[in-house]
Image: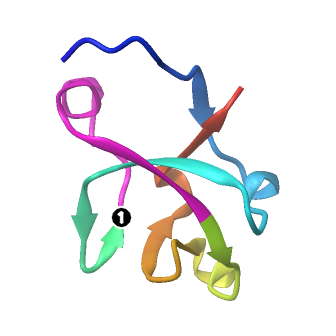
Amino acid sequence: MWTRYYWSTRIATRDDAQLGKLIFIADLTENGVYRPPSGRPEALNGSWWMVTITDLSDMYKLQVTAGGEYHVALGAMRVTR
């Protein structure tokens, strides 16, 4: 699909995990947690969505909660450059 809009992103770091931060996530889950793409083909051919971080209480597991209900691995998050 072609689009008029796009974002230049990078993989998020621990410092990027902040309440209210807009993140981009691939629509890929494993055991109920959103995970990063396994490689370039999966990243380019899959669906992505954006949501804000709403809870940081699981950072000890290197996860955040986004949108109030979605558990996201820190390595799965992308943020704008």
- In percent of the image, x 58 and y 49: which residue is there? 23
**Relative to 49, is 43 above or below?**
above
- Is 65 left or right of 48, judged from the image as shown? right
- Is 57 left or right of 71, judged from the image as shown? right
Q: How is the image coloured?
A: rainbow
Figure quadrant of residue 66:
bottom right
Of 41 and 50, the residue lying toward us: 50
- In percent of the image, x 48 and y 19: which residue is there? 6
Q: Is residue 44 magenta?
A: yes
In x, y percent, where is residue 47? 24, 40
- In percent of the image, x 70 and y 79: which residue is there? 56
* Residue bearing mark 1: 34
**Relative to 75, is 43 above or below?**
above
- Is 55 left or right of 32, judged from the image as shown? right
Magenta region: 35-52
Instruction: Residue at the far bottom: name it.
Output: 57
- In percent of the image, x 46 and y 17: which residue is there? 5
Quadrant that contains the C terminus: top right
Q: Amino acid at mark 1?
A: Tyr
In x, y percent, where is residue 18? 78, 63
Figure quadrant of residue 62:
bottom right
Graded by Cα atoms within 10 Å as few (under 14), some (14 to 19) or many (20 or more), the crowding at tag 1 reads many
